[in-house]
Amino acid sequence: MLNQPPPRDVAPSWLKPFESDAAELEALLATLPPRLAAALGALPQRDELVEIVLDLGRVPEARFAGGVHPLSPAHVSEDDLAQVVGSLGAFTGDNRAGISGTLHRFSAIRNRNERVVGLTIRRGRALQGTTAVVSDIVETALSIMLLGPPGVGKTTMLRELARVLANEFDRRVVVVDTSNEIAGDGNVPHPSIGRARRMQVAHPELQHRVMIEAVENHMPEVIVVDEIGTELEAQAARTIAERGVQLIATAHGQTLENVLFNPTLSDLLGGIESVTLGDEEARRRGSQKTVLERRTRPTFSVLIELRSRDEFVVHRDVATTVDALLRGEPVEGELRTRLPDGSILRRPAAPPISAPAPGVAAPPPRPAS
């Protein structure tokens, strides 16, 4: 029987928190009202904190990977929210703020009058050892896309990939840090990205411009980006790849299929176009005359789906995977499971990606530009 991964609220011994981890947690606690800071500080699992939720008129909660813990029977007041907000710098246009020198993120919820009525305080944490599961892929210098639901460690892995490539592979790495989640708040990048350089983004809608600026002005060999989500960002990613720069990024989506059939992001995986076959070719394929085919070369050569913090599905050849998927053939990646001792178990992913039957229409692709 396969050994089960450790509970997600217990840090495995092979994962090494960064040396400033404890001090950064104290910096987060210092922003809270004293009663909440004391309650959280007294919890035995405090070191495994994921986030704190403060909503006006509701019980304050500390969230851990293993569950939720109320911090006080007293509801969150306007004074509580004001104290936290007052301890921070200004919120950006996307309602985010941080603590200089840390990786924590404070996200505000506002009412119609722009008053803060809720806060999500997400603990940022640098962990060394998270990239061991894909170390063979990192060495290839291929462009890599990371997908997965929130909370599975995509940004943590991006941060560690930047450090490993800069420090251990001596690559020129530039991090485009739109929300300051990869390298932290403040003008000096968090030491967890090693010798990688960081470019901040004034407004989220300018991310695509900074991506191109990084290539044109700073001669990177690797660019690291969190959250490619717009057509302009997808176009910038293709420009970067066409210039021979390795790109490592996350995108909006949980699986390869999500991205492939997303009209905005489909181009990252080569895009989709409808092709009309001749009678003989349609008979040979056993398909309808109108089929879906990949339009061009994918921007990303490798795609990794993070199912959890300990399970990853690796698609080592995105072009081949997409072609098979569009032909209606069974497609499966390689499932890698990180065991409690840090070793990696590899086996075919199950169940395989579901593929549309040949000639069956899929969600509309983005028109060719």
Image: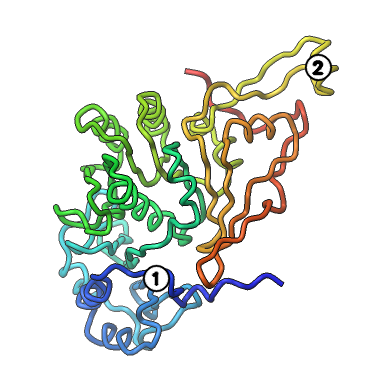
Q: Position of residue 217 (x, y in %)?
A: 19, 29
Q: Distance between the residues labelled 1 and 2?
A: 53 Å
Image position of 138 with respect to 27: above or below: above
Disc 2 crowd, CA 10 A, few/some/many (<14, 14-19, 20+) = some
Secondary structure type for disc 1: strand
Give the residue displayed 55% in from the left and 27% down from the top. 271
Q: Position of residue 259 (x, y in %)?
A: 54, 39
Return the residue at label 2.
282
Figure label count: 2
Q: Quadrant of the N terminus?
A: bottom right
Image disc number at residue 175: none
- For badge 1, the amino acid type reads Val
- Residue on which the image places disc 1: 50
Relative image position of residue 149 (x, y in whole percent): 51, 55
Residue at image x 40%, y 62%? 129
Q: Taking the image as drawn, is residue 353 in sight?
A: yes
What's the residue at 26%, 52% (across, down)?
180
- Residue 183 sits in quarter: bottom left
Mark 1, other Cα within 10 Å: few <14 / some 14–19 / many ≥20: many
Q: Which of 49 and 243 is in front in this view?
A: 243
Between residue 346 and residue 189, name the one nearer to us.
346
What residue appears at the point 56 percent right and 55 percent down from the top-left corner?
Answer: 312
